[in-house]
Image (cartoon, grey):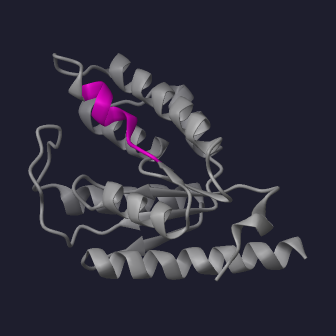
Amino acid sequence: MIHFADLCLYMLKVAITGPESTGKSTLSEQLALHYSTVWVPEYARTYVGNLGRPYTLADIEAIARGQLALEREVQQQAKGILFSDTDLLVLKIWSEHAFGQCPAWITEKLKRQNYNLCLLMGVDLPWEPDPQREHPHLRQFFYDWYKRELQALGVPFVEVYGQQQERLQRARRHIDTLLRQHQLLKK
């Protein structure tokens, strides 16, 4: 077992990313519980849920700013490792698909995201309907898009698939490896 007191000077950050209805929130919560820390929920859920009208490109910008602010806030409570239910890649792809463009500042910040690991969630879970979900038949299309973007960004990522328990076990193996690597670098 890795002791998070040993990570006191450095915060490890893990983003859970990928298409809709792939278990990002569930896995984020499970990982935070397992590692005795906190997770950053998806700001867009609250924002869009309270919008009362169709969202616009300006709303995606507001969501991006809100997500970053929420992450900074929640990070203050984290114990060695922070899990984020979403990242700027989600907002970039959402914006480009919905509006054919992404605000330049989001793209620039995305290039400088400082996650130690991204977990790309597979589309092999059944679709769960939700009023905020829009594309049940495009999940593989989006998955492939996420993968291409992560590869182009050159960020460390792993693909996570299987049923919920398998996803948790796979994610934990990769995170434990990350934690062990970090411990070796600190010595």
Give me the residue at 54% from left, 78% from top: 174
Image quadrant assignment for residue 92: top left
The percent position of residue 146, horizontal first and vertical second, equals: 38, 57
> Is residue 62 left or right of 110 when viewed as pictured?
left
Q: Nearer the viewer, residue 73 or 112?
A: 73
Residue 123 vs 149, above or below: the answer is below
Q: Position of residue 20 (x, y in %)?
A: 24, 52
Q: Residue at x 70, y 67 (%)?
A: 4
Q: Residue at x 71, y 80 (%)?
A: 180
Looking at the rendered structure, the number of numbered marks drawn on it comes to 0
Horizontal arrangement in the rendering, residue 8 relative to residue 114 (left or right): right
Identify the residue at image location x=21%, y=73%.
124
The quarter of the displayed image where residue 95 is located: top left
Side (left or right) of 165 relative to 172: left
Residue 145: percent from the left, percent from the top?
Answer: 34, 56
28 and 178: which is toward the camera = 28
Q: Is residue 92 above or below residue 1?
A: above
Q: Give residue 163's position: percent from left, percent from top.
A: 24, 78
Nearer to us in this view, 134 or 25: 25
Magenta region, mostly helix, strand or loop? helix
Q: Is residue 47 magenta?
A: yes
Q: Quadrant of the C terminus?
A: bottom right
Up-down: is 96 above or below 141? above
Looking at the rendering, in which quadrant would you find the N terminus? Answer: bottom right
Between residues 62 and 105, which one lies in front from this camera angle? 62
Q: Residue 56 falls in which quadrant of the image?
A: top left
Residues in magenta, as a range: 40-48
> Would residue 171 be counted in the magenta stretch?
no
